[in-house]
Amino acid sequence: MKQKFFAIAAIAVLAILGVFIFEYTTLAQRPDRNAQNQQRGNRQGGERGGRGMGMGMTNYASIVDNSWLDLTFAVKVDDETLIKARPIYQVTREKFVKKIEEIRSSGNMQGAQAEMQSFLATTGSEFQASLKEVLTEEQMAKLNELTKQRQERQNEQRQRMNRFREGGGRSGGGGGAQ
């Protein structure tokens, strides 16, 4: 009798746990969750994909941040090199943040993307030249490859999001299970 009770209790617990997991897994996959959250006044997860800059454009300061992470953890340079590279990263990041604030305060959002692209080209070349003085050719090549891979992944994500937005999320237009 105890074995039957234990088996029934174990099945009941597994069933309840399964329902709980299923509910929250499907909740995360619902395409209309941002609309539901905004109706409730909850902005959680609302602006993503680099749109948090308030301009609908890439967060350029995060490019420098990601490069620092790659240099520190993926390229794995020694501490002495990191100490030499740190001021380069700080100055470059401060330039990006200052430029972003300058564009925001100007109110000219029409040309913001083009202006940031040209700023990125000039500041990016200065950044690369400064890093070449600190890093070896091998380290520089690895860092550039990691940056290229990250940009390709971000571009793929943007393309997927654009297709998703343009297509309404699902090809059938319905909200049912596929």
Image (spheres, helix red, strand yellow):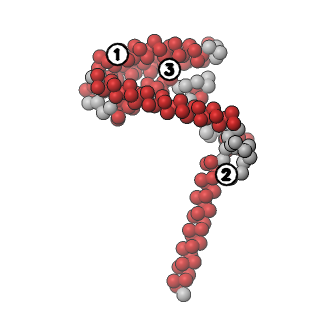
Identify residue for label 2: 178
Question: Hey, what amino acid is under mark 3?
Answer: Val
Residue 133: name its quadrant. top left
* Mark 2 / mark 1, whichever is N-terminal: 1
Quick one: which residue is furthest to the bottom in this view? 1
Asked if residue 136 lies left or right of residue 122, the reply is left
Identify residue for label 3: 97
- The picture places residue 71, in percent across and down from the top left corner, at 35, 29
Q: Which mark is residue 20?
A: none
Per the image, label 3 sits on a secondary structure element best described as: helix
Question: Hey, what amino acid is under mark 2?
Answer: Gln
Identify residue for label 1: 130
Asked if residue 92 lies left or right of residue 58, the reply is left
- The picture places residue 33, in percent across and down from the top left corner, at 67, 44
Q: Residue at x 69, y 36 (%)?
A: 167
Q: Gap between marks 1 and 3, in whole Å?
A: 19 Å
- The picture places residue 159, in percent across and down from the top left corner, at 59, 32
Mark 1 or 3, closer to the camera: 1
Residue 84: name its quadrant. top left
* Mark 3 / mark 2, whichever is N-terminal: 3
Per the image, label 1 sits on a secondary structure element best described as: helix
